Image (tube, rainbow, N blue to C red):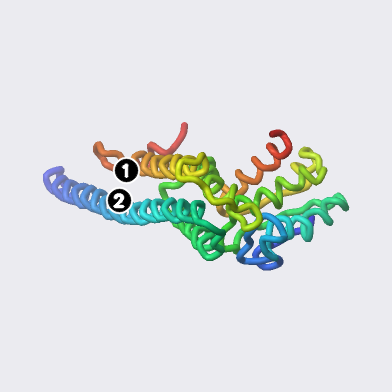
Amino acid sequence: MITVKLASQFSRYPAGRYVVDGPFSGEAFRERFLVPNLKNEQEVLVQLDGARGYGSSFLEEAFGGLVRKGFDKEFLKSHLKVDASNTSLVYEIDQYINEAGSA
Amino acid sequence: MTIATWLPWLLIIIGWLATHLFSEARERRKEVRAQLDKIQERLVKIEVDARKFHTAEKFEHETAYVISSAIYRNEAALRRLEILGPGSLNEILSEHRKAVTLRNFDKSTFVRQALNCQLLSDINYWTLELEDGIEELYRQRYPVTFPYFKPVWRSLAF
């Protein structure tokens, strides 16, 4: 399993939905850390602790965006784990994965 | 040793323990209340800032950062309080964060919002829900009836 420590490997101040919104956007994180590993069928553990806050648009694009990019929800449930002491973040990410593309 | 000898001592010890217990609980309750008041004040400020942000003529990066930071600080303060059991406010915390920062929170998608728009209504609704959720947890932990706190044995599930 590959562990991604978002705060130290990406940014302590992640913000924005798309790359045009800034270098530490949800889209940038997804394309740099999640998509390449998941395409190789690697299990990925994302640790969220350490960053100074997450906007929902960042979370939605980073994780819900995986479903829009074509990753199967069941595949994501078995290959993508999220860990955070703020468990409401994990709750929210689960929602995005479950609800992405269903609207 | 006769009962007349040890009974007064026993009563003194029980009395001291009871006084100590209730005094500790009262102090703890006051500390938690003070922390919660700060959290509630921050929640109101987050709502005010969010309204200004979403109704501003153009995207304000600094305000977005201040709002994100305030939400993070408030959630961290809540987690430090013992009244918040694991996951007890997950849904409301998540919905509040989403109401403020999911839509119209990025430069690429920002559009000035009208004062009567759904987005501002949602922010107000989830702010109030979060305030109520926090107060409900406080009331459960520190009820208004004797003994004015939730004893440990009531937390145990059999």
Q: Quadrant of the C terminus of chain A?
A: top right
* Image point (26%, 39%), residue name: B144
* Image point (63%, 51%), residue name: A57
Q: Amino acid at mark 1?
A: Tyr
Q: Secondary structure at mark 2?
A: helix
- For this orientation, the residue located farthest to the right is A40
- In the image, residue B113 lies at what x, y percent? 52, 48
Chain on which label 2 sits: B
Decide which of tag 2 and tag 1 comes sooner along the chain: 2
The 10 Å Cα crowd at callout 2, few under 14, some 14 to 19, many 20 or more, is some
The residue nearer to you, when weighing A49 against A95, is A95
Residue under label 2 = B29
Q: CA distance from mark 2 to mark 1?
A: 7 Å
Name the side, left or right, on which A58 lies relative to B89: right
Residue under label 1 = B142
Answer yes or no: do the residues labelled 2 and 1 have beta carbons within 8 Å? yes
